[in-house]
Image (cartoon, rainbow, N blue to C red):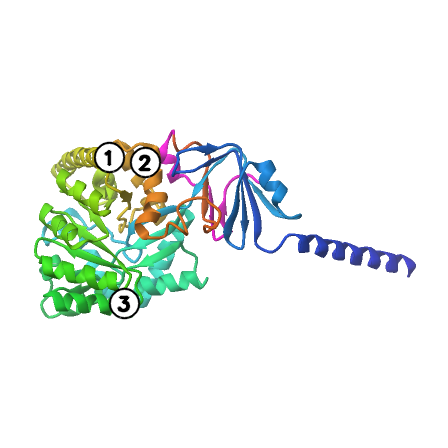
Amino acid sequence: MRTLLTLWAALLFAQLASADTVAQAPAGVTLIKAARLLDPRSGSVLSPAAVLIESGRIKQVGAPERVQADAPAGVQTIDLGSATVLPGLIDSHTHLLLDVIVPAEAESARRYNGDFVPGLLLAIVESPSKRVLLGAQLAREDLESGFTTVRNLGHSGIDGDAALRDAINAGRVPGPRMLASGRKLAPGGYVQSLNPALAEAILRQEFLPIDGPDQARSAVRLNIFYDVDLIKVAVEDDVTPAEMSAIVEEAHRQKLRVAVHAISTASIQTAIDAGADSIEHGNRVTDQQLRQMRDKGIFLDITPMWYGGLYSKIHEVIAMSPAARETQAADDERARQRGADLVRRVFKSGVKFAVGSDMCWFYPGKTRGQASAMMFTALRDVGMPPLEVIRAVTTSAADMLGWQDRVGAIEPGKFADLIAVAKDPLTDITELGRVQFVMKDGRTIRNDFSPN
């Protein structure tokens, strides 16, 4: 009996001692240590480095001996060894509720914009609930690849991206921080050749029509009803300056930014004149327009989907004739040259820019996050320096989103959204496609480094 009492007392003492130790380190306090930490804004590297995290936010960054001295006793330590730590990545142009399977060559050729027909069919054959669940899967896959913040720009049904955002924020499903844009505002010509008996119902699930300034304002307000974070407009050459100005004025009155899909020179000018906040794609932007955007503080959101043969890689698994593959290869080279020219002119102009994947495709054998990360290779292939790529998906992207006080850098007060890679991304930017550690809100999402 004496032996049992002694053992019981020893166990009780151990439990009390353990509880005392835990009490010294408040819940949610973590110390990250690594060989290197990259600051994208300055381009400087801190080596070695430590980050102290408390209640989901960064509290201190510095040399390990100094940061560790300020950490509470019993703090949870994650030692990433020789890794390089960076801010969580931001994909500023994505479509998480689309997962388009490219149709065969013959199927694409017989329809207007045939590659995207399966995407339009989602509005017919899938319920809104199923699309949100698909988005939840793709959001988790993005997060696991290091994308801790995304801006979703349409093709989400009436309010699917807003519902997914809310579920992520509530902790019901894992995913990145998310800005939702709801339905695209678009003119009638954006989608063509649908079954007239169904066309209006299909379009209303994906788009809000623009037909005059009053309807343009109403479309902004209707999206606001679904609690969007920004307004997305798809502009061809058929939106009038008055319509575009009405959209921007109404959105800005409601403190929302406006992202404009604009490809042609005329549509880009319409967006610039109206005072849009970002031009998405901007393929045919002129040097004069880049200077106008610079002077007005308008961002160019570069989408390298067509650079470096990325689009062809998505087509590798479909049935294509030898002639079609030859044509596609020639298109790839022209796209690479156009991309290289655009990047060169962007740097020369001094315009502010970010980068978004524009990923909406099913890529066999890759998760959505892995497919989105292919943009880093594409940007390398058109000559964008690694540090500029990193800024474009961290600090610059945060500025474009208006979230520079929350994300995009590893600085005190910001959310504890961090990633780590094994090697130096300044030497090889494709390291960002091999993220091995992801943290969001101070919570470890994945850690493939060997624990120490």
The local secondary structure at tag 3 comes to helix
The local secondary structure at tag 2 comes to helix
| Residue in front for this viewpoint, 222 or 197 | 222
Type of amino acid at the residue the image marks with label 3: Ile
Figure label count: 3
Q: Point out the stretch of residues depicted in magenta.
A: 427-451
| Residue in front for this viewpoint, 393 or 368 | 393
Type of amino acid at the residue the image marks with label 1: Phe
Label 2 to label 3, Cα distance in Å?
34 Å
Residue that numbered label 1 is attached to: 347
At a point 35% along the width and 38% down the height, the residue shown is 390
Measured as percent of width and height from the top left, residue 6 is found at 87, 57
Numbered label attached to residue 224: 3
Q: Residue 169 occupies which quadrant of the picture? A: bottom left
At a point 48% along the width and 53% down the height, the residue shown is 441
Closest to the camera, between mark 1 and mark 2, is 1
Residue contact between numbered discs 1 and 2, judged by CB atoms under 8 Å:
yes
Residue that numbered label 2 is attached to: 388
Label 1 to label 3, Cα distance in Å?
35 Å
